[in-house]
Amino acid sequence: MGAVAIWTSADQPGLGDQLLGRVIQQELLARLPGWRMTLCSPDGWRRPAVADGGLVAEPLRDRSPDELAAAATLTVVCSDDPFTLELATRLDPAHPVVPFGVREVPAVLAARAAFVAEADPAFLLDHVVGLETLPVRVAQLRQLGELPDGDYDVSEFPAGVVFEDRLAILSGARSVTTDDEHVAAACAALGVSCVGPAPRGSVTELRDELDRLAALAEKTLAEQGGDLGTRMAVLAEENHALRLAHWLLRERMLVERQRLVEPLAETWRERDEAVDEAAGLRDRNRELARQNEELAARLAHVESELSAWQGTKLVRWTRPLRDAYGKARG
Amino acid sequence: MTPRITFVLVSYGGRELVVRCLELLAEHTPQPYRVIVADSASPDGTGEWLEKNLTGATVLRMPENLGFGAGGNLAVRHADTELLCFLNADIEVTEGWLEPLLSFLDTRPEAAAVSPVLLNPDGTVQEAGSVIGGDGWCRAVDAGMTAGPVFTREVDYASAACLVVRRKAFLAAGGFSPEYEIAYFEDVDLMLSLRAHGWQTWLEPASAVVHERHGSSSSERANELMRLNHATFVKRWPAELARRAPVVGLDEHPHRKWWLRDQIAPYRVLLIDDRVPQPDRGRGDGRTMAVVDAWREADPRARVTFFAVSPERAEQVAPALAAKGIEVVYGVGDPGRWSRERAGLYDVVVVFRPHNFVGYGKPIAEAQPQAVKVYDAEALFHRRPEQHFGTADEVRDRRAWAVQADLLRQQEVDAFTWADVAVCVSEEEAHWARRVAPGSSVHVACYPAHVPDEVPGFAARRDIVFFGGFDATPRTPNEFAVLELAGEVLPPLRERHPDLRMRVVGADPSPAVLALDGPAIEVVGKVPDPRPLLESALLHVVPMRYGAGVKIKFVDSMAAGLPFVTTPVGGEGLHLGWTARHLIGASPAEHVELCHKLLTDPVLWTEVQQGLMEICRIHFSPAEFRRRMRDVLVACAVPPAVPPPRIFKCGSRPSATGGPQAVGG
């Protein structure tokens, strides 16, 4: 599989130093799945800095031009560092080199470059930083007293600020004044008002150049004997397996659904039967209640008639006679 | 050497604890590191004292008590290393604690954070990762148990009491949210933020630290902060929490515990076999291990649970599986009840061997109606008693073998019919399975053997070898075979080759096998790695009369470039092609002739050796096994793993492991 070396100045603290390599890496990975991407800088991990945000780059100074050319199918240079630019001119002439977003490409390098990509990668910064995290970072910086409450303008960054914080500071600013074109491009991407140099290129141009870069990488790999056909076959096989697994998963979900719904359907049937039975019992109950009321009414009527009869003079006056008769009978 | 890691402590009082923590850190951390202490305006002067007296550390003093999250964020803004480690002052690190965590991150570029096991001072587990419930509360599901069964895994949440994090991941996730009050839940929030940004958090039990739990707030204040921050947490992650079962009531509904623990896994598979695989002991364990490994390697995030019916040597063998990220369960008396405690958890249930299907697979699967059921035949067990039936002389014996064969055949028919997906080791056995269970999707996956580019040739070898386990019991197929070899093949062979000696290699030789030891036969027994012995012998001779499936010993033999002589039963499923006529004999006399020919004809021997190695490369290579197992997984509706993007350094930087450094996810 192919490999791309991305030469950056990530051991420097500038926003462009940190951002460009990350964007190019992310965009190329999306276009060249499975390729190896190596971020490099002059001192790399030997010179860690707060600004690098934990990025671990390979030191360029450790390796000869021949080693560097041999380690990659293609080299992208997105650094204005003179050492890096000069080193790129010393790579094997057959090894393709593409300066990307470099402010001033030296003539020697431009002459041996496969092509020069000019659009500023910072336009696509939202592919390397979650924009939703930036307001959170602004809140953190305010909490720590490093940003004022309310509106603020930016004209310079405090030293030793991690690049995500730089973007957060830009994103929350009312306006930005800068002489750094990468900062201007970042402001454009963030939709923040900016006074400064116009960023080079546009999002469309940047995408076209990244497409061209990816196509060059594939072409170079094919010319070097890399077997793209095999890779395609592997991808096709993987794709087939994924589709089959997906189909079987859908099938499985249907089976699961049936297994869950069957007992549920049975329960629903039982519930409907129980509801019907309950309705019948309620009707029967109502009928019995009605009959009960009728009987109660009749009873009340009979009891009232009895009581009335017992209250007549005939019954009251004959009572002593009937009692005496009862005693006499023994 | 440039430090790779910065330890971040946030203090609020308790300077003695901070000092003690840093002393232990210095004592047990040989790797270079930096320390940043952010003091959250300690009212007792801790910040001032630390600033004056702490050497070799950066002390940052906050003007007011903003709490753990803000202190952590402040400290990280001053860190310049690749990795961070959040450390509570009441953590006591132990010898060798950091190296496994660094190694883990070096081999898992997709992991943002890794946590050791937090132990109580009495050695029990305090936290080995926690689950986050739908009610927003967390629970350390392994709390109170011993650390033995804890296995490497991705976790829902790991406490920032001791947590190693990639700085780039911490920053990408936005760090600790400022929405929280002084303490509690900011690290839970961080875990969900990391996951939302495509990162993972893991537990590495090879590392353990002691957590004393000295809180710096009163319990009343702590409860108040917890309530406040819990409300904030619930408000921030409604969609995430809506998918989860609540933590409150977990003890009354034990299945929810496993659902919560394993819900982040892309799939959950349960494999059931006789015992925790001991590949060095034969009995099909090598293949079981290969199958378990294939499930494990298909996706490191998947939950792979191995259920061992017998606890045999489990305590010795299980830790190796746990280190691979495999949960090992053994010593279960009631499999049905065990499964009901994990009701509805597994996506796939795999059962090996018919007796396990009957005793464990069926009762376990009852509480897993959603699972794809897989029967892995390993061999057709009914064939062995059928073979004995064919060779037994006594009518009573023949009847007993017939009854046993019938019983096993019925069990196997039931198992294949029960299964949605079945696996056999050879096309011949798969053909039988497809016939008896036309509704099952039957696959073939045998065994992987790596064939080296070069193996010793004829001139560098001598003598013959018998390789196979004996289970320390009489009348096993291997015992029958070695006794026939020693009694009927070796003596006439030694008449033609007087110097010929035989080695018997294999675990747990039975008394009858041990009795063979003598001038011509050396009973070696179990060896840690049989390959050197296989690569030094001229012939592997196993006249086996009984057996089913592919005999793994012959696959190992092929991979070692060692020609073998065996019976038609022994040669089944090996794709021997033209080599069969030089290797397969039905009688002891034929075996003697075949052995003599191979021992005396170096050209033929070499042709057979090369032929066998080519067969092994084609049919039994690790790549072929992976391909076959991928088809099994796909048949179980498990998508094949897609490797994560490869963002690697070239690898010149020295690391904890000395291996290449992964720097992205």
Image: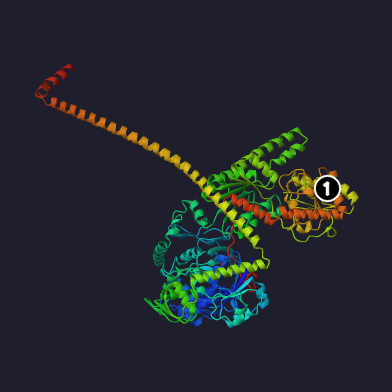
Q: Can residue B85 be seen by looking at this rendering? A: no
Which residue type carries mark 1?
Ala
The percent coordinates of residue A207 (x first, y second) are 52, 69
Q: Is residue A312 left or right of residue B110?
A: left
Q: Nearer the viewer, residue B15 or A75?
A: A75
| Name of the residue lying farthest toward the top | A329
Q: Nearer the viewer, residue B222 or B459?
A: B459
Q: Quadrant of the N terminus of chain B?
A: bottom right
Q: Which residue is mark 1?
A: B486
The percent coordinates of residue A84 (x first, y second) are 60, 80
Up/down of A119 relative to B300, above or below: below
The percent coordinates of residue B241 (x first, y second) are 44, 58
Picture quadrant of residue B178: bottom left
How has the structure been colored for display? rainbow
Tell me which chain the residue with mark 1 is part of.
Answer: B
Up/down of B404 relative to B138, above or below: above
Up/down of B591 relative to B79, above or below: above
Bin the neighbour count of mark 1 within 10 Å (Cα to Cα): few under 14, some 14-19, many 20 and up.
some
The percent coordinates of residue B105 (x first, y second) are 58, 67
Residue ID at (70%, 35%):
B402
Helix, strand or loop for disc 1: helix
Up/down of B536 relative to A173, above or below: above
Picture quadrant of residue B102: bottom right
Residue ID at (26%, 32%):
A290
Q: Nearer the viewer, residue B44 or B548?
A: B548
Q: Quadrant of the C terminus of chain B?
A: bottom right
